[in-house]
Image (tube, rainbow, N blue to C red):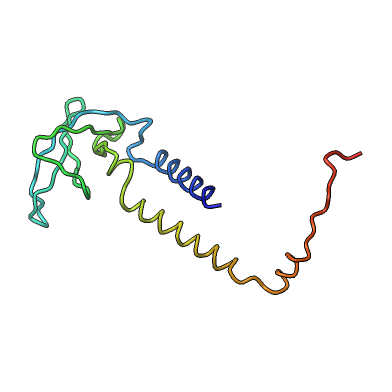
Amino acid sequence: MYKTIIILYFTCFGLYIFFSRQPDFLDGEFTKATIHFIKDSSTKKLQPFAFYTTGKKQYSVNADYLFRELKEGDEVSLIYEASQPKHGAVYSWWGYWITLGEVLFSLGLIIVMYCIAVSITKNPTPKALLEQLDYTPVKKRKYED
């Protein structure tokens, strides 16, 4: 049963990841971007931004993400939608495909669902136990006459 649950979990999570990315992977366009650090006005910290050009306009997106190490002048792949080029994202496994919030939420969800299933089936009523003990499978023919 655990194998089935794990396979179902990874299948659903993989399909969710593939079809929920913004900008869309299937419709998105790829380009190269250069990393530059800019001082954030509120926190006064240097934050990495990816600068890229589409046509004649230059755009920038925040490239800061947990566990992502970027250096000044790094060249990264960037994905954006042609209809909204200002809403791009750095194309990488960690940050575009897999985000920390989604992983934590999905693991929390599967743990909660497992606890609910265990609590429902843990203490069956005496009537249900008697039904299980008295159950005899009925022999059925493969084909009706």
Residue reaching furthest to the top = 55
Quadrant in which the C terminus is drawn: top right
In the displayed structure, 42 sits above or below 126; it is: above
When the figure is inspected, residue 99 is found, relative to residue 132, above or below; the finding is: above
- Residue ID at (61%, 72%): 123
Residue 87 position by quadrant:
top left
Circle count: 0
The image shows residue 114, relative to residue 10, as above or below, that is: below
Q: Quadrant of residue 129?
A: bottom right
Residue 28: image quadrant is top left
Q: Nearer the viewer, residue 48 or 94?
A: 94
Residue visible at 82% across and 40% down?
142
Where residue 101 sits in the image (x, y, percent)?
33, 53
Residue for point 75% across, 66% down? 133
Q: Is residue 31 above or below residue 13?
A: above
In this view, the residue in front, 3 or 87, is 3
Between 2 and 100, the one lying in front of the other is: 2
Give how far across and how far down residue 116 sits, in percent.
52, 64
Left or right of 1: which side holds 28?
A: left
Q: Nearer the viewer, residue 101 or 5?
A: 5
| Residue pictured at 36% horizontal, 30% vertical | 27
User: Picture coordinates of residue 94 (x, y %)?
Assistant: 28, 43
Q: Residue 6 in the image: x percent, y percent?
A: 48, 49
Q: Given the current orientation, which residue lies at the most extreme right position?
A: 145
